[in-house]
């Protein structure tokens, strides 16, 4: 048999043999198990659990304005993945119930109006404690953004003057930084990359962060983009204004320090000094008179 005929036969026989082996050698039991698992997961996803139902119930009974306020605070916090709005709304009644149970136990031990007030206070504290934590952490994050903004604008100004575009300068500043402002810049750039307009992405950034300095900067950038103003000039003016505002805030905090220390100075430090300095003299006078 010639080599050409042998090669032609092998070219036909080998693919057919592989197809037959692939059809009959597949583990049908494994395929059925995989299909059963996929079907079970689909049924579990279609059938909501107790946690999902309870979260939906708390979302329905929560006032819309209050839920919007919580959502705004979570946006200022960076929307942590472990604490979405639905989980927060579901945890709040449970904490309030826990505080109420503890207050009820304390009340039943010795009933009285004072302990009834403690019961109500414990219930309210358990319900509103997550709000206090979220708001406090959101304010700390906003303060960090407000503190980082002047230096970030300086970096963006240097990048723009070196020839980069505004988005490229923003990406460079975000890659060099590691704080919450860098995270917000990265999210804004991702919004632009998925097809959102630049104006909408910038305005969403200002609404999400809710920092007055950043909001004024975003408005200046949007106006410069609309009227064709050089972005380098806008960055230079905004960076100077942010540095000036940061210096003014530092001076304001420094001027508030004497007022803040006045209360502990009068009620804690001065009495201790008077006791230490005048105590021996008073004791000697009292001994001499007696």
Image (cartoon, rainbow, N blue to C red):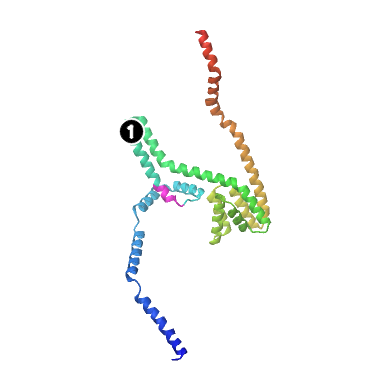
In this orientation, does residue 37 appear? Answer: yes
Residue 281: percent from the left, percent from the top? Answer: 55, 14
Residue 61: percent from the left, percent from the top? Answer: 38, 48
Residue 60: percent from the left, percent from the top? Answer: 39, 50
In this orientation, does residue 229 appear? Answer: no
Of residues 39 and 240, the one drawn nearer to the viewer in this rendering: 39
Q: Secondary structure at mark 1?
A: helix
Task: State the residue at coordinates (43%, 85%).
Answer: 10
Left or right placement of residue 75 versus residue 250 in this view: left
The part of the chain drawn in magenta is: 81-90
What secondary structure characterizes most of the magenta part? helix
Q: How many marks?
A: 1
Asked if residue 7 is positioned above or below residue 137 in the image, the reply reads below
Query: Where's the N terminus, which quadrant?
Result: bottom left
Q: Is residue 84 magenta?
A: yes
Asked if residue 216 is positioned above or below residue 256 in the image, the reply reads below
Of residues 68 and 170, the one drawn nearer to the viewer in this rendering: 170
Characterize the local packing of mark 1: few (<14), some (14-19) or many (20 or more) Cα atoms within 10 angstroms: some
Left or right placement of residue 43 versus residue 4 in this view: left
Task: State the residue at coordinates (60%, 52%).
Answer: 218
Where is mark 1, residue-wise?
107
Asked if residue 258 is positioned above or below residue 31 in the image, the reply reads above
Residue at the far bottom in the pictured view: 1
Of residues 109 and 1, the one drawn nearer to the viewer in this rendering: 1
Task: State the residue at coordinates (42%, 51%).
Answer: 86
Q: Is residue 122 magenta?
A: no
Residue 113: percent from the left, percent from the top? Answer: 35, 30
């Amino acid at each position: 048999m010639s080599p050409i005929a042998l090669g032609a036969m092998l070219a036909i026989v080998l693919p057919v043999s592989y197809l037959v082996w692939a059809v009959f050698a597949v583990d049908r039991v494994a395929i059925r198990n995989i299909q059963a698992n996929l079907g079970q997961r689909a049924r579990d996803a279609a059938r909501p659990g107790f946690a999902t139902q309870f979260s939906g119930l708390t979302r329905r009974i929560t006032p819309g304005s209050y839920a919007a306020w919580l959502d705004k605070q979570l946006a200022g916090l960076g929307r942590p993945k472990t604490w979405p709005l639905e989980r927060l709304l579901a945890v709040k009644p449970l904490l309030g119930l826990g505080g109420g149970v503890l207050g009820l136990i304390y009340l039943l031990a010795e009933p009285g109006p004072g302990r009834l007030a403690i019961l109500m206070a414990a219930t309210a504290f358990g319900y509103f404690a997550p709000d206090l934590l979220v708001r406090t952490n959101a304010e700390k994050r906003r303060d960090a953004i407000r503190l980082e903004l002047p230096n970030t604008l300086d970096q963006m100004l240097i990048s723009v003057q070196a020839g980069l575009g505004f988005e490229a300068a923003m990406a460079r500043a975000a890659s060099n930084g590691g704080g919450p402002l860098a995270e917000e810049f990265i999210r804004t750039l991702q919004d632009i990359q998925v097809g959102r307009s630049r104006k909408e992405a910038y305005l969403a950034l200002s609404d999400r962060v809710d920092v007055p300095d950043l909001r004024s900067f975003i408005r200046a950038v949007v106006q410069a983009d609309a009227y064709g103003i050089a972005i380098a000039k806008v960055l230079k003016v905004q960076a100077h204004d942010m540095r000036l505002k940061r210096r003014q805030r530092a001076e304001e905090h420094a001027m508030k320090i004497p007022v803040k220390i006045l209360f502990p100075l009068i009620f804690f430090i001065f009495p201790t000094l008077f006791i230490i300095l005048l105590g021996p003299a008073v004791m000697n006078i009292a001994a001499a008179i007696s």
